[in-house]
Amino acid sequence: MQLLACGLGGAGSRIVEAMATADNTGDRSCLHATLAIDTDKQTLDELTAIPEANRTLYGAHEATGRGFDGNRTLGEKAAADELTEIYRAVDSLPTTQADGIILATGLAGGSGATLLPQLAEKLRTVYAIPIYGVGVLPAATGDDEPRQQANAGHALEAVVDATDSLVVFDNALWTKPSEDDTDPAIRSELNETLATRLVDLFKSGESNGTNLVAESVVDASELINTFEAGGVATLGYASQQIQRPTSSRFGLGLFMQEEPLEETTIIKAIETTVRRAVRGKLTVDIDRSSVERGLLVTAGPPEWLNRRAIADARSWLAQETGSVEIRGGDMPTPEVDEVVAVVLLSGVGSCERLEELRSAARENDKK
């Protein structure tokens, strides 16, 4: 699925930067174009994977190029005042081949989270392709925690309503108590974690320029249909290193050649990897039985993509979630010695973390 990826605010711009870096690895690509839009000039200047011509600064009058420091009121005003110019920055990119638009942002900030709903509404007046959100939840502790939690709670409803689906990533879930998600090294690691999952998901149906064709292709329509459940979505991911059995023709360690694989070995590897992806750490923790739709992508060397094993894994996922709409497919990666499972769960009905943030917003409104 070919995407136009727009990073809004500092967090969103860094996420799209990480996506662009991840997209440049391997022989598949899902990013048709990338763009960063922020009120902080320094953040834009630090980007390298997004072309300089595709970086837009706004809100200079209110923020003087230094951002809004979480002030949603200033952010909303700046977005409204300069919405036409921001829209033109998106519209100037080559969009004809894009299957969808991603708008990524941190939900606790004052820039991206207030711009996203307004920009999405403007884009819908012209573009008839899906608009997906990527929203990052804060891991703030200390004095700034109440404000960030309330900001994220306030942003949630507007961002969910403005997008066809919102993929949520919870920094608090992915950081240790001793870690700070504002530390550049920690922040980079978190962004890479999220970007890997997003890019592997959207790359799954793209050609790698060879004659290798998946047994079951995950094309753009499969992704769109899964995301059509709307609301909140979460991603699961797991990988497992594999060893390809080899032997020497003369028993001397010379002329090594691959031997046939045992089917039980393949089935066990796929089953284990898929279960780890679903039952392990998701991008945001949810009640797995509350999802409406799911999509399973299994990647690995062609000889490891056993049709029966993948079908069994999809059946297991349907039982695990209770969903009757589980799609799936495979992605041959002949040069990689690992099996990978990427799981998209959409239409989430129950997420305790999001309820906590909504409650924090309501309590803040009472003050």
Image: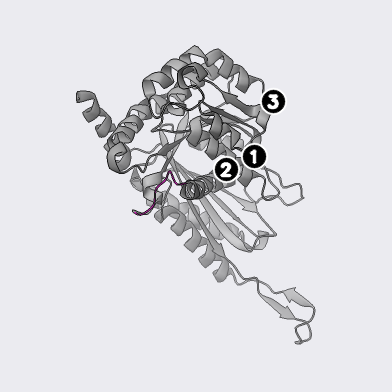
Q: Which residues are magenta?
A: 178-183
Q: Is residue 18 above or below residue 132?
A: below
Task: In this rendered view, identify the residue nearer to me: 89 or 307.
Answer: 89
Which image quarter holds the C terminus?
top left
Residue at numbered disc 1: 49
Task: In this rendered view, identify the residue nearer to me: 152 or 288.
Answer: 152
Q: Is residue 156 above or below residue 85?
A: below
- Residue type at numbered disc 3: Pro
Residue 70, x across and y down, in percent: 39, 29
Q: Is residue 92 magenta?
A: no
Report if the CB atoms under discs 1 and 2 are less than 8 Å apart. Answer: yes
- Residue type at numbered disc 2: Ala
- Cα distance between the residues tagged 1 and 2: 8 Å
Could you tell me which secondary element the residue under label 2 belongs to?
helix
Is tag 3's residue or tag 2's residue first in the polypeptide sequence?
A: 2
Q: Is residue 126 visible?
A: no
Q: Nearer the viewer, mark 3 or mark 1?
A: 1
- Cα distance between the residues tagged 3 and 2: 21 Å
